[in-house]
Image: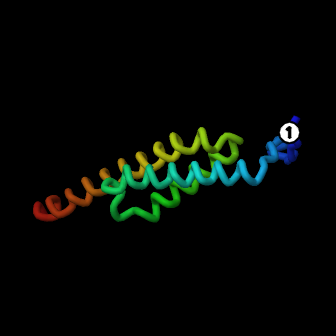
Amino acid sequence: MKPTIEAQTEGKPKTAPIYSSAFKREVLKQVHKARARICSEYRGLIEGVENGCRLALNEAEALAWETGFPQLVFPDLAAEKVAALAQWRQRQDAVQGLRPALASFV
């Protein structure tokens, strides 16, 4: 049985497994590779919002670590968050593209 750390979360005890340093390094390496892959996949769609992409990836990583299985959860969660950012960017580009056309009607 693995030792665990208990923490209070909203009145309910939460246990988190204690992992070895080698395991943590391996998981961090997998997460880093996933971050690089996702950034390269969405590079053209998130141009101009790189800081937002970094924040989305950080948030996804933090949430993934809370699950206890970050190497499994992070890639899909990060891709979902960066895809949402890319959609937001496309909507912003569409709206900003309409502004000059609307101004010409005034």
Q: Residue at x 73, y 52 (%)?
A: 22
Q: Is residue 72 above or below residue 31?
A: above
Looking at the image, which residue sits at the far left? 105
Q: Residue at x 57, y 50 (%)?
A: 31
The amino acid beneath tag 1 is Lys
Q: Locate residue 71, reporting x and y percent.
A: 61, 43
Q: Locate residue 37, reporting x and y percent.
A: 44, 50
- Left or right: residue 33 versus residue 3 is left
In the structure shown, which secondary structural element does the residue marked by tag 1 occupy? loop
- Residue 6, by quadrant, is top right
Q: Residue at x 33, y 61 (%)?
A: 47
The residue wearing badge 1 is 2
Q: Quadrant of the N terminus?
A: top right
- Left or right: residue 88 versus residue 28 is left
- Residue 96, by quadrant, is bottom left
- Left or right: residue 20 versus residue 105 is right
Q: Nearer the viewer, residue 77 or 103?
A: 77
Q: Residue at x 47, y 43 (%)?
A: 80
Q: Nearer the viewer, residue 28 or 64?
A: 28
Q: Locate residue 91, reporting x and y percent.
A: 31, 51
How does the figure colour the protein chain or chains?
A: rainbow
